[in-house]
Image: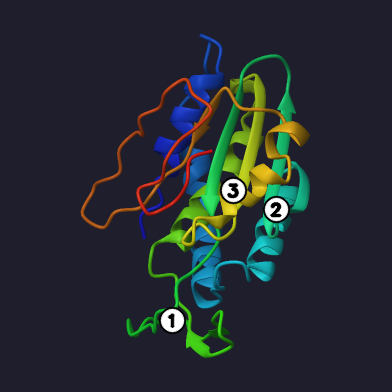
Amino acid sequence: MNFPISAFVSVVVSLLAYPGLAADPDPLVEAELPSLVALYQELHANPELSLQEAETAARIAQELRGAGFEVIEGVGGHGVVGVLKNGEGPTVMVRTDLDALPVKEQTGASYASVKTGKDDFGRAVPVMHACGHDIHMASFVGTARVLAKRREAWSGTLVMIGQPAEERVLGARRMLADGLFERFPKPDYALALHSRRRCPTAPSASSRATHWRTSTPSTSW
């Protein structure tokens, strides 16, 4: 499983770092990989539908707290916000999606989902992380861990966002309506990633903006 943490960390640190940036963080990334693979498999095996991500949100909140972030849950529903202040500098928001899809898994993986959920009509439906949100969350957690351990390499504020209901567009809107940018530091930069099966890992593009758009149907912050 390919977690693009090194590229993601490099982009975040490039936005926050002083010229005297410390050495490449790859050794830290390598050290985190075994536990991140386990987290990915745990999340993959326990998907939750949009607007139903209670356990997923709690798990991400637990990881952020463990990394040293101040965490608030229940933002706009099951939204999670983690803040790590580290001196003067820009504010960078890193975002992941939390929800899964009503899809039956047929991968045969040892950690395949056998979960079911209820759709809007109360019908039982199979649930699977078929859009890569499990990989996104594991990479998000890895990024949070590495950056928290590398505070000497950057200065500023990190805001880590767990967005519910990305697949249904509702999650970002509800977090914004719940005062996301009034209650928490407003970002100078906002970053996210989307896994792609046929695309090799590479640094992400970034721009000085407070909005973005994902590559699946979603809404801009």
Q: Depth check: 159 or 4 in front?
A: 159
Q: Which mark is residue 112?
A: 1
Q: Are marks 2 and 1 in contact (CB under 8 Å)?
A: no
Report the residue at 38% width, 82% height from top.
105
Report the residue at 71% width, 29% height from top.
185
How is the structure coloured here? rainbow
Q: Label 2 is placed on what type of residue?
A: Gly
What element does badge 3 sit on? Answer: helix
Q: Label 3 is placed on what type of residue?
A: Arg
Residue 214 rendering spot, x and y as whole percentages:
41, 45
Q: Depth check: 1 or 183 in front?
A: 183
Residue to which mark 3 is pinned: 173
Q: Is residue 70 left or right of residue 81?
A: right
Tag 3: Cα neighbours inside 10 Å, few (<14), some, or many (≥20)?
A: some
What separation in Å lies between label 2 and label 3 (alpha carbons)?
8 Å
106 in relation to 93, above or below: below
Tag 2: Cα neighbours inside 10 Å, few (<14), some, or many (≥20)?
A: many
Q: Are marks 1 and 3 in contact (CB under 8 Å)?
A: no
Q: Is residue 50 left or right of residue 63?
A: left
Report the residue at 61% width, 27% height from top.
187
Marks 2, 1: nearer the viewer: 2
The answer to which of marks 2 and 1 sits earlier in the sequence is 2
The image quarter containing residue 193 is: top left
Residue 62 rendering spot, x and y as whole percentages:
73, 57
Q: Label 1 is placed on what type of residue?
A: Ala
The image quarter containing residue 39 is: bottom right
Residue 161 rendering spot, x and y as whole percentages:
62, 45
Q: Which mark is residue 76?
A: 2
117 in relation to 214, above or below: below
What element does badge 1 sit on? Answer: loop
